[in-house]
Amino acid sequence: MKLTGFLTALALATLVFTGCEKANIDVDTTPADGSAIGEVSGVWAKGSTQVIKGDIIIPEGKSLTIEEGVTVLMDTLTKPEIVVKGNLYSLGTEANPVKFTVNDSYKTDAKKFGKLWGGILAAPTCAELVLDHTILEYGGATTSDASTSVKMGLYKAVAGENLPALWFSNVNGKLIVQNSIVRNFQEDCTYIEGGKIIFANNMFYTTGVTGGEAMNFKSGCLADVGFNLVYSANTNALKLSNAGDRTPQAYIIAYNNTMVNTGWRRPTAKGGSVWLEATVRADLYNNLFANTRFGVKRDPKKPEDARSKYGNNWYYGYDQATVNQFQPGSNDIVAGTNDVKSKMAGDNDPKFVTYPLSTATNNAVFTTTWDFHLQRNSPALGKGITTFTRHHKAGITTANGITYVSPEPATYVGAYGVKL
């Protein structure tokens, strides 16, 4: 009897240990809810809550898969960083997204720009990172000398930097961000320094206190960026740069994106919508600019690659001051072929379903009931082109056998056509 009891206990212990290994390497957890600090890999099970009590690291050569409906709850005292030296797959669904967040009690107006945890920082050894139907919110803490990222020489590797929601740095890596939301961050949403990249069907809003872009691409990036909504980024919706001189040259194809109210909360030369610099190659088509500060704008001292192409972009300004600064001229505004750009306030109303175009341009508070689809009588329907070639039409296949394809361009402008 004693031997049988011992064997039963041993079997149970083995089952518990196996469950722990599935979720984390070094921490006491289960296949369902758990907590984490230190090295993690394996699977965080569907619908579970994982409490992150300090910095976590996915080791080189290992992977963490986060299943649909998982809540990754960040400790606001330790303000954890998520360091990815291996691979990360965050695989939510429309009905059950993955959420990187904090307790609801911390989501106050005083904390609308986050700073309550760090961000996801992918080292050059990270080969693959996927965020699908994933919400990142209330992060962007400022680094200190004690930060893991500073000690490891990651991101900008100095104290005093505001972390982005996502940093990726492998020019040979694969990065997919789709169907996701980034909101309530202190500065940049993303800071990308290389890789084969798809950014599609995402939303970025309530980001940037005194600076920060929604999508910030540097040299080494071959990116398709389509069907994203950016609302009131402090600086630009897209900062496109070949800075860093990594190979390959940065080549960004951005199409069918909707940008609203971007750039007004940073009234400097760089505050705008799309910023081009440092020999970046950029193709920009079918993008909708509504009440943004500037349109496509270049750095006159370090302009973009001469092979860059622009066309069929749509501009709307509610007041004359906004319309005036869309015009090509001394502000280094870029003009495209078949752009729709009037000189009169109120022209070219895209006819969003519900968004009030009279909303103050410096408003940073996003209302989730706004609908940026186009009405059936919108003049922006049929004004897009589909004849350009994108990088990842054939798709990017990850090690888990999933192929991600950048979406086909649409014949309308902006991220959303008529609501079906």
Image (cartoon, rainbow, N blue to C red):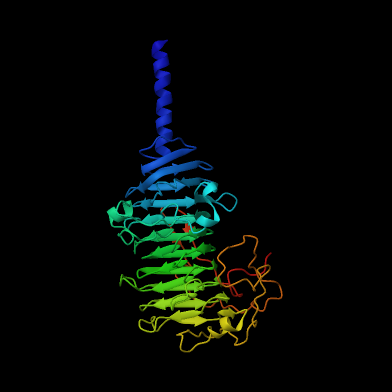
Q: Residue shown at 48%/89% (left/top)?
A: 329
Can residue 134 be seen here? The reply is yes
How many numbered markers are drawn? 0
User: Given the current orientation, which residue lies at the most extreme right position?
Assistant: 377
Q: Say which quadrant the N terminus sits in.
A: top left
- Residue 215 figure quarter: bottom left
Quarter the C terminus occupies: bottom right
Which residue corresponds to the image point at 38% horizontal and 45% vertical from the top-left? Answer: 54
Position above or below: 181 against 219: above
Q: Where is residue 57 in the image (x, y as percent from the top left)?
A: 35, 48
**Where is residue 299 shown, x and y percent of the image?**
40, 81
- The residue depicted at 71 percent of the width and 72 percent of the height is 376
Considering every residue shown, the one lying at the far front of the view is 110
Foreground: 410 or 112?
112
- Left or right, residue 160 beside residue 12: left
Q: Is 328 on the left-hand or right-hand side of 151? A: right
**Up/down of 126 relative to 75, above or below:** below
The image quadrant that residue 248 belongs to is bottom left
Q: Which residue ends up furthest to the bottom in the rendered image? A: 329
Percent x, y of residue 395: 46, 63
Residue pictured at 46% horizontal, 80% vertical: 297
Residue farthest to the top? 1
Residue 209, above or below 292: above
User: Viewer-proximal residue, 227 or 299?
Assistant: 299
Q: Is residue 44 in view from this perspective?
A: no
Residue 373 in the image, given as x and y percentages of width and height:
64, 68
Which of the pair 212/131 is nearer the observer?
212
Depth check: give the residue in front, 222 or 143: 143
